[in-house]
Image: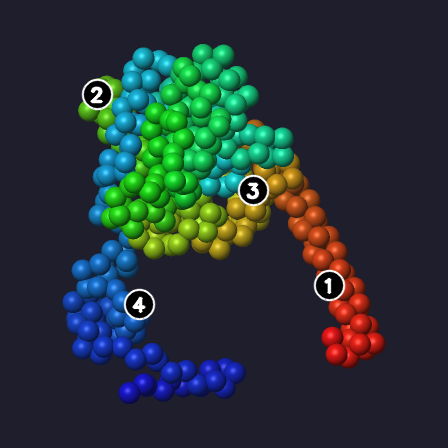
Amino acid sequence: MKEICPASLSDKRWLLRACDEMQALTFTQKLSVSTILARLLVMREHELASAPLFLEPSLRRHLPDPLILKDMEQAVARLLQAIMAGEQIVVWGDYDVDGATSSALLCRFFKSLNIPIALYIPDRIKEGYGPNRLGIQKFIEQGYTVMITVDCGTTSFEALNETKGLDVIILDHHAPEAGLPSAYAIVNPNRLDEREEVTQTLGHLAAVGISFLCVVALNRALREAGFYKGKQEPDLMGLLDLVALGTVCDVMPLTGLNRTFVAQGLKVMVQRKNVGLRVLFDKAGLDEAPTPYHLGFVLGPRINAGGRVGESFLGARLLSTENPEEASEIAQKLDQYNQERRLLEAEALEQALIQVDSESEYWQGLCTLYPWI
């Protein structure tokens, strides 16, 4: 029988959804949680074994072996070879927040290894989405031998057919077509030939999540190859602020590994170690612990503004820089571009409403003259 709760402030009476009371009691006793929380877990169909991870997301317990993803082993092996041989590597990213965070994550990781890496974000208007032949040819001519595309590349068939001499590694999450483009490795949990269990558990990741898994696997390969002998390993946990930002702003479901990424990433973000994010916090007047709301509606629109109405590369550069002065200059530009974006959207909305009103008056007039319409 449904239990009736006290009336709300608006004099509405709340009814608790029915649930298995014995199961809720088990949750209460086994997990040492309140009755209300136990009931909520049961209502949301959590299992006793998985509930603790939901309540306290742990990367140590939740992070899968990245090599379960198809082509991840090939991608890591090629990057390891490039690092050891001192080859030139370029990251080609998308211009939205997921692309910017993915690009910045890779750049920050390689910088922590003291390995130079180029970053390229195409112009949204002039070049469109994903790799293009002219850009690829430019990097080939400059001697680059490895290109990592992030948040793009899965459907870039024409451009990736022109990559002779350049090994392309795709880190993406977008739904592919029936076939796949020519590339050295395509790491995408939504590949049609990926194992079903991988797609089910990792198919909801943003590209920045895939990029983080690649970095985890590459870091392990470097350790096993003796690269860190006498050196300090990079702090991979410190990159989770970028993973959280990209995941939320790409509107990925906050379940499973994404929930863990965001929960842990917010803990990293509150420390404000990323220079670009710290400056962006200040520009936005954010002086409290960030939440997913702040990521999606305060930080995200500013980073996106560069690709929308300004310079596409600004977001990725802001998130990857270690220079406070450069970060401040970029954040100021992005803030201005965001204001322009808001004005443009407001004008577009006003014009749309005027058009709707005009058409409404037109149809009302017709209906008056011809009632049978």
Is 244 left, or right, of 257 in this rendering? right
For the residues labelled 3 and 2, the Cα–Cα distance comes to: 38 Å
Mark 2 burial class by Cα count in 10 Å: few <14, some 14-19, many 20+: few
Identity of the residue drawn at 30% across and 80% down: 18
Which residue is disc 3 drawn over? 304
Viewer-side label of 2, 1:
1
Is 152 left, or right, of 67 in this rendering? right
Viewer-side label of 1, 4:
1
Which residue is disc 4 drawn over? 44
* Residue type for callout 4: Arg
Which residue is disc 2 drawn over? 225
Q: Earlier in the sequence, mark 3 or mark 1?
A: 3
Identity of the residue drawn at 34% across and 52% down: 259
Secondary-structure class at tag 4 = loop
Q: Earlier in the sequence, mark 4 or mark 3?
A: 4
Q: Earlier in the sequence, mark 1 or mark 4?
A: 4
* Residue type for callout 2: Ala
* Residue type for callout 3: Asn
Vertically, is 146 above or below 52? above
Secondary-structure class at tag 1 = helix
Viewer-side label of 2, 4:
4
Which residue is disc 1 drawn over? 356
* Residue type for callout 1: Val
For the residues labelled 4 and 3, the Cα–Cα distance comes to: 34 Å
Q: Earlier in the sequence, mark 2 or mark 4?
A: 4
Contact? badges 3 and 2 (CB < 8 Å): no
Contact? badges 4 and 3 (CB < 8 Å): no
